[in-house]
């Protein structure tokens, strides 16, 4: 391999060019950086760059591993490695490991420190320069000030387009961001669901100054059930109740009523027992033979209730063990959302060739996240809107 390889002085100029204004990421970066500095010193050139070590980061973010060698770490985390101990294979494996570490770094200490160290803020008065470096892909973005602090977090299906809007809008918040922004970092997610969940969690964790207006709840209505005096299960869309867990949630009343209308049509439910009609007589659908007469006690209670329970079952993940599989960051990758016993556990990414039906492997891939009403609403709302989302019961 080395017989016909170029000498170091022949590639030195290119190394300077591709590492300028960059942070070198390597597994045991001290070793690689020392070699580079030594070779440049022989050429009489002072080579100086900032580094990040994936060994040190792994020890912080994935504690208690048996070994932190690249090969054993990759095997334990399900990272595919080709051409082991060859430059290309090891570099690609390190990239995948670093992506996983970025994902597990929920406090964002890596990018906070990286942005602060780079001091890119001084060369970013022109907002166009920042925009030009951003991808037109789905993910979460972080707007930083001159000290590297995160001042705004958002998600978008097109990061470049969304940041352009921040930089061109004339509302009060956008003007403040334009005055304070020094740089923008981002994390591609591929999946809109993963982006929504990460955005929600990281706004709560980092509390950026320009996200404070988003503290209000994103949903106001919930779906509830009760059994009436005749034994029929009734469904109602109503204001979120403080001490009663809803079956599912909605952003507003209109969204809830629209959902209920679809359920009535799909499951042949009674619109009176679903709270969309009032009165003592039969519902409108009974007259057009779309209701089987539960409103007049003509339909057997068990038969009607069975269909209502199907609606509840499909729109709630209470007590369920399941994973949701969605798009990944690359064409050969998928994202995974883990729910155990009705509780959202976290998100992760896996290679298409990697089996994830093993609970231990699945747990090693998952970055733990908080389970709360916001995450429940985000997941259930996304599942309603995306019928092609792959759901696997565990």
Image (spheres, helix red, strand yellow):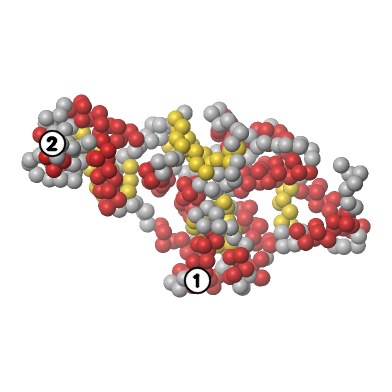
Query: Marks 1 and 2, how far apart in space?
Result: 55 Å
Residue indicated by mark 1: 168
User: Do callouts 1 and 2 mark residues in contact (Cβ within 8 Å)?
Assistant: no
| Quadrant in the picture for residue 113 | bottom right
Residue 299 visible in the current orientation: yes
Question: On the rendered structure, is 367 left or right of 318?
Answer: right
Residue 174's spot in the image, x, y percent? 48, 69
- The single residue placed furthest to the front in the displayed view is 288
- The single residue placed furthest to the left in the displayed view is 280
Residue 254's spot in the image, x, y percent? 27, 53
Q: Residue at x 65, y 37 (%)?
A: 79
Helix, strand, or loop for circle 2?
helix
Residue 221's spot in the image, x, y percent? 29, 49
Residue 302's spot in the image, x, y percent? 20, 26
Question: On the rendered structure, is 268 left or right of 54?
Answer: left
User: On residue 28, which mark appears?
Assistant: none
Where 173 sits versus 322, above or below?
below
User: On residue 295, which mark appears?
Assistant: 2
Where 241 sits versus 156, above or below?
above
Question: On the rendered structure, is 147 left or right of 260?
Answer: right
Bin the neighbour count of mark 1 within 10 Å (Cα to Cα): few under 14, some 14-19, many 20 and up: few
Foreground residue among 278 and 151: 278
| Quadrant in the picture for residue 44 | bottom right
Q: Residue at x 25, y 28 (%)?
A: 306
Foreground residue among 65 and 93: 93
Helix, strand, or loop for circle 1?
helix
Q: Residue at x 31, y 41 (%)?
A: 246
Q: Which of marks 2 and 1 precedes in the sequence?
A: 1
């Amino acid at each position: 391999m080395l017989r016909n390889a170029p000498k170091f002085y022949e590639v030195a100029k290119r190394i300077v060019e591709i590492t300028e204004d960059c942070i070198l990421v390597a597994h045991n970066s001290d070793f690689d950086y020392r070699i580079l500095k030594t070779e440049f010193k022989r050429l009489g050139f002072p080579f100086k760059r900032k580094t990040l070590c994936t060994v040190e980061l792994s020890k912080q973010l994935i504690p208690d591993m048996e070994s932190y060698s690249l090969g054993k770490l990759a095997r334990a985390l399900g990272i595919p490695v080709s051409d082991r101990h060859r430059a290309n294979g090891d570099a690609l494996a390190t990239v995948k490991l670093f992506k996983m570490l970025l994902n597990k770094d929920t406090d964002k200490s890596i990018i906070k420190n990286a942005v602060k160290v780079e001091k890119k803020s001084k060369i970013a008065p022109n907002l166009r320069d920042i925009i030009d470096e951003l991808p037109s892909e789905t993910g979460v973005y972080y707007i930083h000030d001159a000290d590297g602090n995160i001042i705004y977090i958002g998600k978008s299906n097109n990061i470049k387009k969304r940041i352009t809007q921040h930089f061109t809008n004339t509302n009060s918040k956008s003007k403040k961001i334009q005055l304070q922004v020094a740089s923008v970092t981002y994390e591609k997610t591929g999946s809109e669901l993963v982006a929504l969940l990460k955005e929600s969690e990281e706004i709560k964790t980092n509390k950026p100054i320009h996200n404070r207006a988003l503290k209000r709840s994103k949903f106001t209505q919930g779906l509830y059930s009760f059994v009436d005096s005749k034994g029929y299960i009734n469904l109602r869309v109503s204001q979120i109740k403080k001490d009663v867990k809803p079956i599912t949630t909605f952003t507003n009343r209109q969204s809830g009523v629209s959902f209920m209308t679809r359920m009535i049509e799909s499951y042949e439910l009674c619109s009176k027992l679903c709270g969309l009609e009032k009165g003592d007589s039969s519902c409108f659908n009974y007259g057009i033979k779309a209701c089987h007469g539960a409103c007049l006690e003509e339909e057997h209670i068990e038969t009607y209730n069975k269909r209502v329970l199907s609606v509840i079952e499909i729109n709630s993940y209470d007590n369920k063990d399941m994973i949701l599989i969605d798009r990944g960051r690359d064409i050969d990758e998928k994202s995974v959302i883990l729910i155990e016993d009705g509780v959202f556990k976290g998100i992760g990414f896996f290679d298409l060739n990697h089996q994830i039906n093993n609970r231990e492997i699945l747990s090693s891939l998952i970055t733990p996240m908080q389970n709360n009403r916001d995450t429940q609403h985000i997941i259930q709302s996304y599942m309603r809107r995306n019928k092609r989302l792959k759901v696997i019961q565990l």
